[in-house]
Image: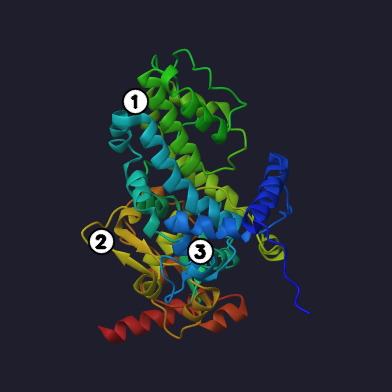
Amino acid sequence: MNYRLPKMAWDKTAYSILMRSVKSLSASSWTGDSYEVSGFALAINLWAMSSVNVLGKSLGKPCETSSSSDPLCLHWDSTRTPTITEVLELEKINNLVGKVENLLGKEFKKLEDSFLAPVIKMGRRQKNMAFSRYLIHHLLLRRIDICKKGLWFSFGEQLMRFSLREFHLATGLPCVVDKDEDEAETSATKKKKDPWMNKNQTLNTLLKLLVEKSTELTTDQRLRLGATILVEGILMASNPVTSIPEERLLRARNFKEFCKYHWGNLAFDYLLKEVKSFTYKKLTENNQYVICGFIYPIQLWALSSVNQLGTFFGITDDEIQFPLCLHWTETKPLTIEEVNRFDQMEKVDVKCILGDPELHSDLVEDVDCEFGRVVDLFKRGYRLKRQDWLNGSIDIAVLWLKWTKIICSQD
């Protein structure tokens, strides 16, 4: 006996179930540790990857035999689940730059000519800049806690430094040696603050204000609000629903003063604090975690510091050496297997200090004398052996003697 399903508009039924389920989720549901969506939720995933090029490139593999007339479920050969951090990193630069540019119109040119220029240029080609969550995770697991104002990692058994100097090289953002937190206000910054400069603002509320009240704001107000959104959404990159400190919002009372501020220092300090808050246990006990801050420069720095990684997983514009966010025109995502394979290679070309160590050296914190001697060894070309890591210590005096003999024998 053959049983036939009743004739129904199954597509409409499935869509209605999915729509009701999504609409039933409140803002608190989205921000919780987990939630459940009823219905064929995979359809949303496939649609998003097909609509947003950078998502499709980073998270899926197209089916080579599929045609344009096939449904999206046949267009994708495979997809993977991104971490929350990965989605935020992929979305924030590409989306924010475009939104602010559309709303500001010709006034956006002033932002393009400001300290934000490198970030804006990178944002426009974000579709080619894949975020490698496995590379970042690998580095975070191998962070060495040495100094307060910088980060040290290891790759291929070798030390790598990421300090304010490297952050500046990667982003081109203005950084100063000694920032004065108690700087005196100028007559320009003492101007009456705008209504949106209060402690209850988030990135989402600022975006909503710019979208809905754009015609009610003056040209100068739109410009300053747009600049604030790019700083908070990209450089600080905190949770979109987290309140922004009022003192940061007040920086935008005057556009010229806003552009003179040492945003590079502030963005690096925020990233530094965020990275250091992640212990080995915290990194390994959960399948997903969220890292706020402008973490993308760490990836660009890693590709520049590890020759094999940069060669296989990125494309550069050799006519632009600084900053790294413009030097790299395309980056590809790495699998965990690829990261481990390169890390375990017998000979990995790792730069302990990126570029000329004396360039912008004033932005680097002085390390203790003993560790400083280790760093000097790396600058001279020494590479740690696997046994050094297994021992958990090295004899600096013996290393200096052996390395000096090697150098002398080569002369």
Q: Earlier in the sequence, mark 1 or mark 2?
A: 1
Q: Which residue is mark 3?
A: 72
Quadrant that contains the N terminus: bottom right
Viewer-nearest residue: 77 or 89: 77
Secondary structure, mark 3, is helix
Of tags 3 and 2, the one toward the viewer is 3
Residue 221 sits above or below residue 361 on the image: above
Q: Which residue is mark 2?
A: 317
Rendered image: mark on residue 256? 1
Residue 107 picture quarter? top left
Secondary structure, mark 1, is helix
Q: Residue at x 53, y 63 (%)?
A: 133
Image coords of residue 361 (percent x, y)? 36, 52
Q: Are marks 3 and 2 in contact (CB under 8 Å)?
A: no
Which kind of residue does numbered mark 2 sit on? Asp
Q: Is residue 132 visible?
A: no
Secondary structure, mark 2, is loop
- Report how far apart the C-alphas of labels 3 and 2 lie in the structure: 34 Å
- Report how far apart the C-alphas of labels 1 and 3 lie in the structure: 48 Å
Rendered image: mark on residue 78? none
Viewer-nearest residue: 248 or 370: 248
Is residue 227 left or right of 281 when viewed as pictured? left
Classify 10 Å Cα crowding around label 2: few (below 14), some (14-19), many (20 and above): few
Of tags 1 and 3, the one toward the viewer is 3
Q: Earlier in the sequence, mark 1 or mark 3?
A: 3
Quadrant that contains the C terminus: bottom left
Q: Earlier in the sequence, mark 3 or mark 2?
A: 3
Residue farthest toward the front in the current orientation of the protein: 1
